[in-house]
Amino acid sequence: MRKNIFVPALTDSQRDEISTVEVPGGFSLHGLLDYDTLITADEFDFHELLDRARAELRAFDGRVDAIIAHWDFPTSVLVPILADEFGLPSPSLESVLKNEHKYWSRVLQRESVPECVPDFCAFDPFDPDALEKIHIPFPFWVKPIKSHSSQLGFEVTDAEVFATAIARIRAEIGRIADPFDRALERVDVPAEIRVAGGRTCLAEQVVTGTQAAPEGTMFRGEYHVHGLFDMRKDATGHSFAHLDYPARTVPEDVQQQMIDVTERYLRHTGYDNGCFNSEFMWDAETGKLWLIEVNTRISQSHSDLFAKVDGSSNHGVAIDIALGDRPRMPHRKGEFAVAAQCMVPRYEDGIVRAVPGEADIAALQRRFPGTVVHIEVQPGERLSDLPNQDSYRYKLATLYIGAPDADELERRYREAIDALPFEFAETD
């Protein structure tokens, strides 16, 4: 019998990636709400979104077999609520919120894997004396206790930079903070955490090193990692330039340490019947391993790379678990030995005048078969008005490239950037 699988904010690229997945008996893919509603909206009414999603599912003329979360908040929190109401496998809402809430997560990390946790403290960004109450010396990071895609995250080097960052945070934090508070109302939050509502921020010690990310699953208590990625930053050290698969910059014993630390932490949070990806920083000089964060879903940034190297998108394991089946993932059955998700960045504001056309993209794909290009901007847009950008650069395009070896992968990335023409008008 064909399974009916629902994916909130389903996109065409997700449909393409999920087409690499096989489900016994076949499946039909259905969107739930839309991308603009769940991802790019100027504001989110959590209860309204939940009611609308619930109504769509109840109106469906057929059986609802699985609901999958591939996006950050609010999708990540809506799905466990809906899955519970429809009797479907999913992590508990509480275990998801423990990870989504950056301060709650850090407290739980300090309890379970203290050797890997940077120094941190919560503070109120609306407190005029906030800086005096942060015990971490400069430089340190500041970020809301709930954000995604590095939004409203700033490295603070002095009081002036702190003031600039806090002004931006105060103006924009409510977009995610207020609906996140509505989600927190649905679980029993410990008193220590309850004082840090959605409009709270976190200050964290700056850590440096080589960054890598395991991805895996927890299914009925069975923990498994199916891939590990290099997370390579650009020259500024603030933003990612590209993700490489499989990882090669971190020794195998350190990779195993990342895997073991993630398991200890996830079990401590009670997380089960879901996917995860975690991020670590390893200091090669000192041997110190730092846990950056754990996300309670597959990484969509990894999806095409798994398909290129292993022969199937990681959507497969998410679908398996959502259907109540043990997750299955092929290994090294793909067309390429290595693959990368690469960013085409711009570091100054501007108004987009022209973007690569279909002919430019087709020519690049003829040179490097298998390359996928997602143009993220359109003519007439001002970069500083774009939603969901990090604090240090604008993303013009995302490339997914495969190659027979690492050196060839680097060459293809450099040549792909040169082959994609963008034009900008300067802003005042």
Image (tube, helix red, strand yellow):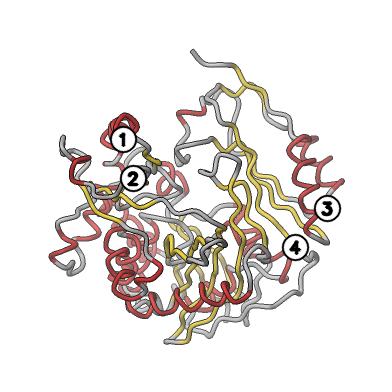
Q: Which mark is residue 369?
A: 3
Quadrant of the image occupied by residue 314: bottom right
**Observer-nearest of 405 and 4:** 405
Q: Is residue 33 above or below residue 22?
A: above
Identify which amino acid the numbered label 3 is placed on.
Answer: Pro
Which residue is pictured at 37% across the width and 76% down the height?
271
Furthest residue toward right = 367
Label 4 vs label 2: CA separation? Answer: 35 Å
Is mark 3 in CB contact (under 8 Å) with mark 1? no
Closer to the eye: label 1 or 4 = 1
Which numbered disc, 2 or 1, marks the residue that appears first in the sequence? 2
Q: Secondary structure at mark 3?
A: loop
Q: Identify the residue position indicated by label 4 in the image.
A: 338
Which numbered disc, 4 or 2, marks the residue that appears first in the sequence? 2
Label 3 vs label 4: CA separation? Answer: 14 Å
Which numbered disc, 3 or 1, marks the residue that appears first in the sequence? 1
Q: Quadrant of the N terminus?
A: bottom right
Residue 286: % across, % down = 51, 63
Which residue is pictured at 60% across the width and 40% down the height?
235
Q: Secondary structure at mark 4?
A: strand
283 relative to 422 in the view: left or right: left
Q: Is residue 105 above or below residue 411?
A: below
Is mark 2 in CB contact (under 8 Å) with mark 1? yes
Q: Secondary structure at mark 1?
A: helix
Q: Which mark is residue 142?
A: 2
Closer to the eye: label 4 or 2 = 2
Closer to the eye: label 3 or 1 = 1
